[in-house]
């Protein structure tokens, strides 16, 4: 009988705890996005000689999370390469459309 009473009291306390949790109000949660970590560059796997090539840049947070509103960041970036054939290029976050910047060869 004592064992049954202990189990019942434990169950009753557990139920009171569950009810107390479910009746409490949630606090507001504020999420601040982290800053840009890097760009992912996408280019065709196979390129023919003398073919014009476009490539895409996508802005990424840490942990490979795509930045959905990068166009609103209002930042400027300088694209620098080791190639002598490509000039330095300045691009602006406002130029990102559908989360991607398409860099076209002229």
Image (spheres, helix red, strand yellow):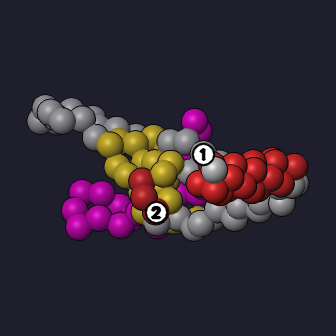
Compared across the picture, whether 79 is left or right of 7 comes to left
- Element assignment for label 1: loop
Q: Earlier in the sequence, mark 1 or mark 2?
A: 2
Report whether 67 appears left or right of 32.
Answer: left
User: Can residue 72 be seen from the camera position used here?
Assistant: no
Toward the viewer: 97 or 85? 97
Q: CA distance from mark 1 to mark 2?
A: 13 Å
Task: State the residue at coordinates (24%, 57%).
Answer: 85
Q: Which mark is residue 68?
A: 1
| Residue 106 picture quarter | top left
Q: Residue furthest front?
A: 1
Q: Of discs 1 and 2, which sits in the foreground?
A: 2
The vertical placement of 106 against 93, above or below, is above
> Disc 2 on helix, strand or loop?
helix
Identify the residue at the far left of this view: 49
Query: Which region of the structure is painted magenta?
Result: 78-98
Could you classify mark 1 by the number of other residues whose Cα lies within 10 Å: few (under 14), some (14-19), or many (20 or more)? some
Magenta-colored stretch includes residue 80? yes
Answer whether labels 1 and 2 touch (C-beta < 8 Å): no
The residue under the point 50% across, 48% down is 66
The numbered disc on residue 42 is: none
Question: What crowding class fits label 2: few (fewer than 14 Cα within 10 Å), some (14-19), or many (20 or more)?
Answer: few
Residue 30 on image: x %, y %: 77, 62
Expressed as whole percent of the image width and height from the top left, the position of residue 21 reads 79, 54
Q: Position of residue 36 (x, y in %)?
A: 53, 64
Reading the image, the residue beneath label 2 is: 62
């Amino acid at each position: 009988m004592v064992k049954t009473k202990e189990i019942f009291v434990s169950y009753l306390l557990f139920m009171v705890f569950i009810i107390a949790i479910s009746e409490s109000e949630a606090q507001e949660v504020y999420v601040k996005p982290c800053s840009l970590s890097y760009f992912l560059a996408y280019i065709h796997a196979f390129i023919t000689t003398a073919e014009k090539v476009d490539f895409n840049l996508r802005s990424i947070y840490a942990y490979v999370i795509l930045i959905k509103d990068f166009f609103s960041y209002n930042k400027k970036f300088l694209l620098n390469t080791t190639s002598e054939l490509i000039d330095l290029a300045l691009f602006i976050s406002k130029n990102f459309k559908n989360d991607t910047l398409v860099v076209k060869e002229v």
